[in-house]
Image (cartoon, rainbow, N blue to C red):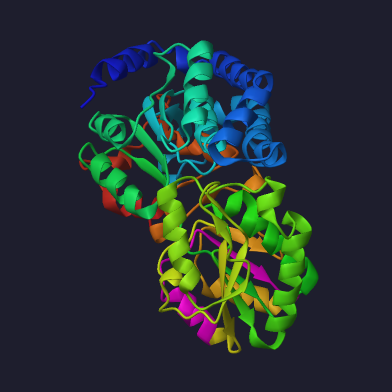
Amino acid sequence: MENYHDLLTKQRTFFQSGKTKEISYRIQALQALGQLIRTNETEIMAALKRDLNKSEFDSYITEIGIVLEEIRFSLRHVKKWAKPRKVKPALAQIGSKSYIYPEPYGVTLIISPWNYPFQLAIAPLIGAIAAGNCAVLKPSELTPQTSKLLATLIGQTFPEEYITVVEGAVETSKALLNENFDYIFFTGSVSVGKVIMEAAAKNLTPVTLELGGKSPCIIHKDANLKLAAKRIAWGKYLNAGQTCVAPDYLYVHRDIKEEFLNALVNAIEELYSNNVFNSGAFTKIVSERHFNRLLGFLSNGEVYYGGKQEMKSLTIEPTILDHISWNDSVMQDEIFGPILPVLEYDIAEKMVEKINARPKPLSLYLFSESNEFQSFILNQISFGGGCINDTVYHLSSPYLPFGGVGESGIGAYHGKGSFDVFSHEKSVLKQTTSFDLPFRYPNRKNALKQIKMFIK
């Protein structure tokens, strides 16, 4: 097994030099990262095309544009974020001043997944840089062209002792996890997240885990069905459903189910054509193993729409499964593919009960015109984040921290959240020497009586 001790020693030495803590250095690094992306946009799109058959449109909106916006946002705010913040002192600390100093953790490890192999590697790296850390980036071996390009571009732009990419498979990840990092940021499955957390626990290393789960999409009887169908078709079949926040299953009110499913079929054909094999623009499934896993779900319930697949191109067309129950295999784990099972409900309380009986989802989507029903769902179901009358879009806001809860993850990032994730908030009290409070000392007469005047 590889040994990365020397690499960590190099990065720790560089971090301890204090260079990465300089705001000017962080700004220069963020600018260099932005320039790297803009200069190599064509190459990045080509790698994503080879790895996942992503179109240039999808590559830009989901991989490139989103991180460029994150960089712009961080550049505008990093000076303010990094400043010590003055906070109010307690009454018993009269004469003192209290501050919070954001400081970087040090040497960080970022393990990124294959489904958005560029965006989900770069987005946390932006936070690590803005907060003043060094970083080791481990991209997924399942998207080798993007991983190789990341290694080349990062290697050309940054010194190894500051930021570096380590390529490899599971053994490489295990070897990296054997080292004593100051912070670990992982995006991936729940099962691997547990392995990461177990490894981190050996060194009491803090972690952010961006995981997944079965994200419900509820369509109430008062929803704008045509618009709901279009936004759900976009959010579900984007990247062939290989999105951690994709609607995993539909919960449709019985009264409008048929009307909605007809609208959903129309929306799919409008957005993706009625033959994705001929169009050649639909994202492929990442590997043969995942392709075969997804095929196993097609026997569940009844195929309402789609269901065709092509092994040669690892493509499965947008598919809707009807007559599904919670006992079906498609409802046991996150689907992570272009297959959308449909459940129906008529009593909202029972529907909520069923959702709450499962692990807390990463996202939840609700389509309803009723403020009362919206409030009911938001108050009754715990989830990482989501949208009302839309899907996936909450991810694009730098003002909305993104993360899970329970089994769907620990910690949240994007915008200032990315800076916060990679920063320790150091609390400091600066005490006056102009006077002293005598009642704080045990030899003071009536000390207890006096101190009770301040602390009750």
Q: Position of residue 242 (x, y in %)?
A: 54, 51
Quarter holding the C terminus is bottom left
What count of labels does the image hold? 0
Whether 136 is drawn above or below 337: the answer is above
Q: Nearer the viewer, residue 38 or 84?
A: 38
450 relative position to 398: left or right: left
Q: Is residue 299 magenta?
A: no
Answer yes or no: is residue 182 visible: yes
Whether 422 is drawn above or below 267: the answer is above
Q: Residue at x 33, y 30 (%)?
A: 182
Q: Which image quadrant is residue 280 in?
A: top right
Q: Position of residue 93 (x, y in %)?
A: 41, 40
Specify the segment rendered in magenta. Answer: 350-369
Q: Is residue 365 magenta?
A: yes
Q: Nearer the viewer, residue 49 or 80?
A: 49
Whether 238 is drawn above or below 71: the answer is below
Q: Nearer the viewer, residue 18 or 452?
A: 18
Q: Nearer the viewer, residue 370 or 429?
A: 370
59 relative position to 98: left or right: right
Whether 381 is drawn above or below 125: the answer is below
Q: Residue at x 52, y 37 (%)?
A: 117
Seen from this angle, which residue lies furthest front?
A: 312
Quarter holding the N terminus is top left
Q: Position of residue 2 (x, y in %)?
A: 23, 24
